[in-house]
Amino acid sequence: MKTVVILGAGNVAFHLTRAFIENTIQVKQIYNRTLEKAKKVAEENNIAYTDKISEIEKADLYIVTSSDSSIEEISYHIPFENALVVHTSGSMPIQSLKGKYRKGVLYPLQTFTKDRKLNYNEIPFFIETENEDDSKKLEELISKVSEHVYKTDSQQRLFLQMSAVWVCNFVNYMYSVGDDICKKNNLPFDILKPLIKETADKIEELSPEKAQTGPAKRNDKIVIEKHLNVLQDDKLKLIYDLISKKINSKYN
C-alpha cells in the first residue's frame, strides 16, 4: 500500500496525517464534511482536500477517522471496491463499515490534541482485517510509523478502549477536580505536578496494585471523613466515597 486518503479532520486525522508524512507515506487527500476543517489539516501538509464524498480520489487505503455515529454513513459512499477501508474506532466492530471493499480497523491507542507534539513511534496501533493478506499489508504500512503494532479483535479492542478511558480520561478529570479545589483555596495547581509525575513514573517499575497509597488503602477513616466534610459538591462527595470504598475493599 502506497497511497492514503483520510476521511475526517479531527484530532486523530491531524496526527495520522502528520505521522504518515513524517514517515514518507503519501497522503493524497483529506475529506471532511466541513470544508474549512479539511482545509486546515490539508494546507499545513500541502495535501488536496474536499468536502464532497463524490470527489474522493482513488487510493490504496482509506482511513475513516470520523465519530462512531458517522462511520456507517461515510464508509457507505466509498466507491472503490479494490481498496482497503479501515476505521479508527475503539468501540465499533469491523462490520460497521458499509461498502463493497476490503474492510479493517486501525485503532491508535493515544490521547490526541492537535497542538500537542507526539512521538508516533511510541504509540501502539491495533489492527484487524477480514483476511491475513490485508493484515500483513496494513501491519507493514503502520510499522513505518510505530514499532508497536498488534492484532486484536473487536471485543478485545472494546475492552482496551474502556481501560484507556479509566487510565486517561477519568484520571484527567480527576486532575481538573484537583485544579478546581486548588483555585478555590488560593493554591497553585503546579504544586501537585511532582506528585502527578511520580504517580505516573511508579508504574514503570511497580504494578498499579503495588503502587497504591493514600488514606483509603490504609483505612484512615478520620482523614476520609475530614475530606468528605469539606467537599461542597454532593456528587464529588459521592465519587470520593465510592472510590475510597472500592480501594478499601481491595486492600482490606
Image (tube, rainbow, N blue to C red):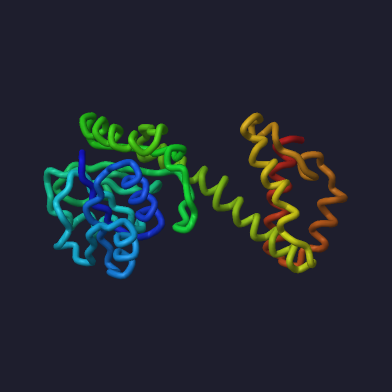
245 left or right, relative to 123: right
In the rendered structure, the answer to whether residue 203 lies left or right of residue 47 reads right
Q: Nearer the viewer, residue 6 or 225?
A: 6
Residue 65 lies, in percent from the top left, at 33, 54
**Residue at point 30%, 65% (across, down):** 39
Residue at image coords 36%, 40%: 154
In the rendered image, the quadrant that contains the N terminus is top left
Q: Position of residue 198 (x, y in %)?
A: 70, 41
**Spot occupied by residue 251 in the image (x, y as percentages of width and height):** 74, 35
Foreground of the two, 217 or 43: 43
Q: Nearer the viewer, residue 102 or 237?
A: 102
Tally of numbered tags? 0
Q: Going 31% across and 59% down the picture, which residue do you hit?
A: 8
Residue 11 place in picture, x, y as percent: 41, 57
Q: Quadrant of residue 237?
A: bottom right
| Farthest right residue in view | 222
Quadrant holding the C terminus: top right
**Image side of residue 103 versus residue 215, left or right:** left
247 vs 153, left or right, is right
**Which image quadrant is residue 106 in?**
top left
